[in-house]
Amino acid sequence: MDNPFGKITTLERVLELFHNRMTIMFGGFGGVGSPPALIDGILEKGVCELTLIGNDTGFPDIGIGKLVSRERAVKVIASHIGSNPIAGQLIHDGKLEVEFSPQGILAERIRAGGVGLAAILSDIGMDNELVSKEKPRVQLGGKDYLIETALTAEVSIVFAKKADEYGNLIYDKSARNTNPLVAMAGEITIAEVEEIGPLGSLNPEEIITPGVFVDYLIPSKGVNWKWAWE
Amino acid sequence: MGMGVDIRNQMAKRAAEEIQSGMVVNLGIGIPSLVPNHLSTETMVMFHAENGITGMGPSPANGEEDENLCNAGGFPVTLNSGGSYCDSAIAFGMIRKGRVDITILGSLQVSQNGDLANWIVPGKKVPGMGGAMELAQKAKKVIVVMNHCDKHGNPKIVASCSLPLTSSECVDLIITDLAVFKVTAEGLLLTELFAPYNLEDVINKTECEFKISENVRNIPY
């Protein structure tokens, strides 16, 4: 295949972008839609003291949970960690810091980061200290809102079903979840893709993430973990 | 409790009575997930999942699971005809914009003014709120389906929640194994009883005052 935009590359090459103490944003919801080869590569490279931003911490051996449960992160920004008891234990032991954000607000904070906005205004969880603590408030039309800051990352990693050589992406069913948002919010975005085709191979009306947001494409061999329901 | 309908299904069946054709409905885990079994095939409902599904169908048969088609709890589901996928920001946009007609969820405690406490289990680590706050705060109607008392026999309907709140003054209807309450501006109103329970049973097992409807319905199933 041609590689006219130079975006198609290998896992080995993109792993050069990862280093200690960086911020990584990941797509996925309970591990569904998280990029397996990239996560394994980051794990094997051994980078640590990471800040991870995404919906949840997966399961101990599923999705981003693999990095969390092997203590590669010092902070997670997520909406839920309940499916990964090791994350809960690490937080309890003071080895991992967590910032919880309501799920849809987290998604919008990521989206805001991806579309060049500094923050969003939200009325979710205003009376809940865990959500509202230390967040500035503004009044608009007689109502109070929290200022929820946008989120970005040095590198975003996403998992897609199909891509063309420009990095236009199509996802698979509910594995889309946070991926289109995360894809926009990275300074550098790497998509792990199951099928990479030539320009013109995707129906332009069906592309979910424009390739504008995607810097690198690596081929995927698919999920390599066993699901909780299996 | 005749007809062999167990208590969980009894509560789910009562919750299903609230659902009308054309509604968008979000179901929590546990008893709420039994609700679709009690809807007639003529009721056209779009079941919504926070990860990004509208029009979710039943669980697939063994061996038919698709790892990329799961509900917000991570379990395999199917997609009904007319269903669609979206990203999670849009899925929550539907909730915040008020497009989700009903959310049916479990709870640890509900107070007499509709405060919901369902996200921190006493003595366990804080799991995070997930999407519960947005659903509780923004779904048009919040229905709680839960046992009347916890496993130690303590009432779960209380004057004021002792557990941390998910969201305040958000619950509209409470369905327990004993009774059904509406949350009104004047507090709780008991409207229905499940056999074999009577008013006295409910009063004894409820930790707050409540009004009693003039026509209490005895639920026939």
Image (tube, rainbow, N blue to C red):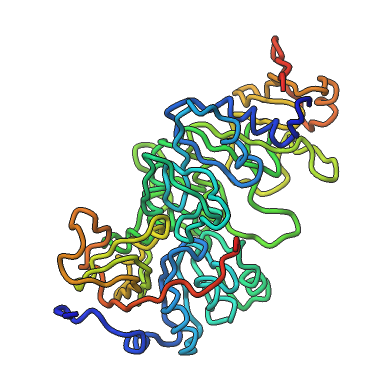
Decide if residue B39 is on the left or right side of residue B2: left
Q: Count of labels shown?
A: 0
Residue at 70% over, 48% down: B163
**Side of A196 where A122 appears, left or right:** right
**Looking at the rendering, which quadrant does residue B38 occupy?**
top right
Q: Residue furthest top?
A: B214
- Please determine whether, in this image, residue B197 is positioned above or below residue A44: above
**Residue plotted at (47% across, 87% down):** A47
Picture quarter with the C terminus of chain B: top right
Residue B117 in which image quadrant: top right
Looking at the picture, tell me which residue is in the foreground, A101 or A54.
Answer: A54
- The image shows residue B162 at horizontal and vertical percentages of 73, 45
Q: Position of residue A146 (x, y in %)?
A: 43, 51
Looking at the image, can residue B95 be seen? Answer: no
Identify which residue, A120 or A5, lies in the foreground: A5
Tell me the residue at 73%/34% (across/down).
B159
Vertical relation: A187 (above or below) A14: above
Whether residue B153 appears in this view of the structure is yes
On screen, residue A21 above or below A138: below
Q: Which quarter of the rendered picture does the N terminus of chain B lie within?
A: top right
Give the percent coordinates (x, y) of residue A95. Answer: 62, 78
Identify the residue shown where x is 24% and y is 58%: A207
Q: Is residue B140 above or below residue A164?
A: above
Does B91 sit left or right of B207 as displayed? left
Which quadrant holds residue B144? top right
Residue B60 is situated, as x and y percent measured from the top left of the image, at 53, 50
Q: Nearer the viewer, residue B42 or B135?
A: B42
